[in-house]
Image (cartoon, rainbow, N blue to C red):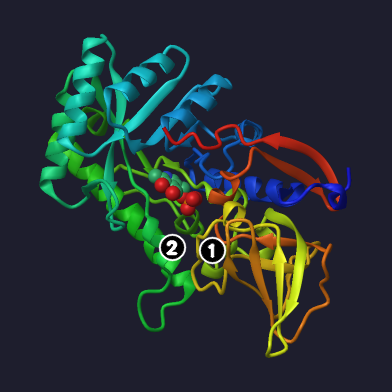
Amino acid sequence: MLLSELPTPAIVIEKSRLEANLQTMQELANAQGVALRPHTKTHKSVFIASRQRDLGAKGLTVAKLGEAETFAGAGFTDIRLAYALYGTDKYARLAGLLSSCRVSFCVDTSEGASAASAFFAAQGLTVDVMIETDIGYHRCGVRWDRSESAAFALWVDSLPGLRVCGILTHAGHSYYGPQSEGESLADSLRRVSNQERDRMLEFAVSLRQAGVKAAVSGDLEISVGSTPSIRYFTNRDHEGFKITEIRPGNYVFHDMTQVNLGVRGMESCALTVHATVFSKHKNEDGSERLFIDSGKKVLTSDGAFRAEGYGQILYDAGNMVPMPHAVINALSEEHGWVLVRGGSTLNVGDRVRVVPNHSCVVVNTQPHMFIVDGEDVIQSIPVDSQCKVV
Ligand SMILES: Cc1ncc(COP(=O)(O)O)c(C=O)c1O
């Protein structure tokens, strides 16, 4: 099938760009001596996860238990739930996976740890947990620099049914960009990357001092990662500890957020939304209003760092050249509003490709993605963990 025959809207993945992204990240992990445990929240696809495993990924990361069930069901045997799992319904489902898969999850509160310990101990199970650590994003996690955090880890390690196997952080503030006058995009990524690494290594030392078994034996897993903070990641030894794994997710596709942050260029954006212009009108000032068949339900209303609008329309999709003067400046549920200053050559019936602001959430809107090689649609792949939010 040709791309021009594909019903729109459709999520299109350019095979060569996907492959280049997968290989580049695996090479970075190999060069820095860390395991790559990619976060599947971006692609939600067994097909792509299998390719990551073939290239050398060690295990997978998920956010939700339903995602863990999807990938465990597809034969993956080492899954990290990078989420502070809470609730006996969830623990029971996790226990059901343990016969075929190592599943670890995060704890960051005494309530969560106590509840998990009570459940798993009653089942006669011991489950690996990661201490979720806040190194600056302030989403979840215990503070890396507080003595009570190391004491918390030691206490969790003493609970029946749980074993502290590592520490985990997500430097989501890598998405904030430069924070001071004169700081470049690259400098801001390096700053967060180094901070993420150094604070986690410090925290590992404090766990060893506190007597957490995995830290004392040198087996502590130290897990970091976001696509921006991994861009300039370099590993280092600090008092016998090194980062052991990275968990980027978005890198498989990238998007306008990553481009605007300077993580990668347009040529690394593997995912586009293929859409059709279905209406066109003139504005009083001579500009044009085009409507594409991808609104909020496909592009989603996520903005992007320094982005004008809700995704970048391409003029030349083969070379990833943006269309000048065309801005998706508003979205209805089923309409993408495109403002074209000075008028455009696009007409009703024309097809466009859009690089979305945030590829991960776009993938979650569709049951399938289409892998293409230029104008040829090679195959349709399911979004296996679509909407697995429970
Ligand atoms: C806990 C955790 N780990 C890893 C990632 C991957 O980050 P990115 O999508 O920037 O690669 C995320 C993303 O939200 C996350 O929440």
Instruction: Name the spot of residue 317 as percent of width and height, x first.
Output: 78, 63
Residue 225 visible within the image: no
Residue wearing tag 1: 257
The amino acid pointed to by label 2 is: Tyr
Position of 103 relative to 346 (above/below): above
Query: Which quarter of the rendering shows the C terminus?
Result: top left
Image height check: is 83 above or below 225? above
Is the distance from the Cβ of mark 2 to the nearest ligand 1 atom less than 8 Å? yes
What amino acid type should be assigned to the residue bearing mark 1? Thr
Residue 233 place in picture, x, y as percent: 46, 55
> In what element is the residue under mark 2?
helix
The answer to whether residue 99 is above or below residue 294 is above
Which quadrant of the figure contains the N terminus? top right
Question: In the drawing, does residue 248 fall left or right of residue 117?
Answer: right
Q: Is residue 369 left or right of residue 363?
A: right
Residue at the far top: name it: 124
Residue 91 is marked as none
Residue nearest the viewer, comparing 304 with 224: 304
Question: Which quarter of the picture shows residue 389?
Answer: top left
- Please give the name of the residue rendered at 72% of the width and 49% of the height, measured from the top-left corner: 12
Q: Position of residue 367 (x, y in %)?
A: 64, 37
Q: Can residue 48 be seen at all in this image of the molecule?
A: yes
The residue that label 2 is drawn on is 175
Question: Could you tell me which secondary element the residue under label 1 belongs to?
Answer: helix
Q: Nearer the viewer, residue 167 or 79?
A: 79
Task: Give whichever of 86, 60 is nearer the camera.
Answer: 86
- Could you classify mark 2 by the number of other residues whose Cα lies within 10 Å: few (under 14), some (14-19), or many (20 or more)? many
Ligand 1 near label 1 (Cβ, under 8 Å)?
A: no
